[in-house]
Image (spheres, rainbow, N blue to C red):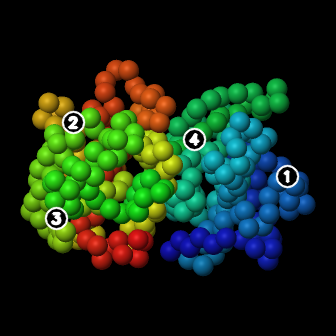
Amino acid sequence: MIRIVTASEHDIPIIEDILLDAVRWLDSVSQPLWNAEQITWQRLARDFRPNDFLIAFLDGIPAACMALVDHDPLIWPEIEKGQALFLHKLAVKRFAAGKGLSAALITHAKSMCMDREISALRLDCHTYRPKLRAVYECNGFACVAEKILFEKYHTAYYECEVRDTRHLYHYYEKNLPPLCSITSLPFEKAVELLRSYQAEDPNRTHPNTEWFLTRRYEMEKKVRDRFIDIGGKPINDAPVYCTLGANKGMETWFCEGAHLRIPISAIDLDAVSFTYGDTFPVFNPALNTGEEWWGQVYRYDGILRLIDQYGFPEDPVYDSIHGIFPKDKPINQYLKYIEAHVWSDEVLAPYR
């Protein structure tokens, strides 16, 4: 059993012992990386605090460690504090080699990124250590650069994009109430409301109000019916829209945007359906290129399977506020995000 804990001052000897074990083994196979002086706490304390370290226990025995910080101005000077987490000093004791400790620590680091709403995990390692690089690449890291650091150290720079699959995000205009759905209104009332928004800012809504709403009502009924077919239990006729994980583009849909972050663990998933992309393109037959997600609705476990297999949908960089969009095709033809449809007021009540 693997258990991971945040270190304290009392754990400094454990950290030193794990790192020293790694130093001795690397020296024994003629692949020196750190020397014994570099992994003493006196030296480590220049860059780390005790609680920057995580210790992994295997069956109750300290077996591995790593440091995780939110700023690395020496190696990644262009990344502002808090924009990424940086992994350092990952080491596994020889008795625990091959037992999944590295993967467990990296997975834990990804979870910490999700908890802090950070979308990138970064690290650097020796360029000419193929086995070490393979470990990182198998855990989702991609090499983004290779440099000779300080004209001396051959260094490979790695980044792992962390997409949050543990929270729903609901984006809304800050001066309006969140968690509302215009299609919960009768059609005429919805038209009236959308036109009032158009009068304030013509760029905020679809120019063809009645066509847009007619399509939206029809699509929501189709999604609701298909959700029931796969065992979903929607209560409301109209959903509140969210995304699975954060979405930068959606932040630009609003003049003064805000968002709510709702833990998946805190909601009844029988009342939440998902599409692999924005519902409009997903249910547009003209865009169907044959993949399994077109015209389909999923439960949470089903959408996680798709993400594991295909990753997240293609989501180009765009900025609705400033009118910056991709040039190869209209933005509404991209899938953009995993869309979540919440069909229950009870699920949302704690967040209203």
Amino acid type, residue under disc 4 in the picture? Glu
| Mark 3–mark 4 distance (CA, rounded to whole Å) | 42 Å
Q: Which residue is mark 4?
A: 159
Q: Nearer the viewer, residue 178 or 137?
A: 178
Amino acid type, residue under disc 3 in the picture? Asp
Helix or strand or loop: what does disc 1 sit on?
helix
Q: Nearer the viewer, mark 4 or mark 1?
A: 4
Q: Which residue is mark 3?
A: 237
The label shown at residue 319 is none
Q: Residue furthest top?
A: 328
Q: Quadrant of residue 240?
A: bottom left
Q: Nearer the viewer, residue 71 or 30?
A: 71
Q: Quadrant of residue 283?
A: top left
Q: Nearer the viewer, mark 2 or mark 4?
A: 2
Q: Which residue is mark 1?
A: 38
- Looking at the image, residue 288 sits to the left or right of residue 316; the answer is left
| Mark 1–mark 2 distance (CA, rounded to whole Å) | 66 Å
In this view, 56 is above or below 246: below
Q: Nearer the viewer, mark 3 or mark 1?
A: 3
Residue 201: percent from left, percent from top: 39, 39
Residue 75: percent from left, percent from top: 74, 39
- Looking at the image, residue 139 sits to the left or right of residue 54; the answer is left
| Mark 2–mark 4 distance (CA, rounded to whole Å) | 43 Å
Amino acid type, residue under disc 2 in the picture? Asn
First of labels 3, 1 by sequence position: 1
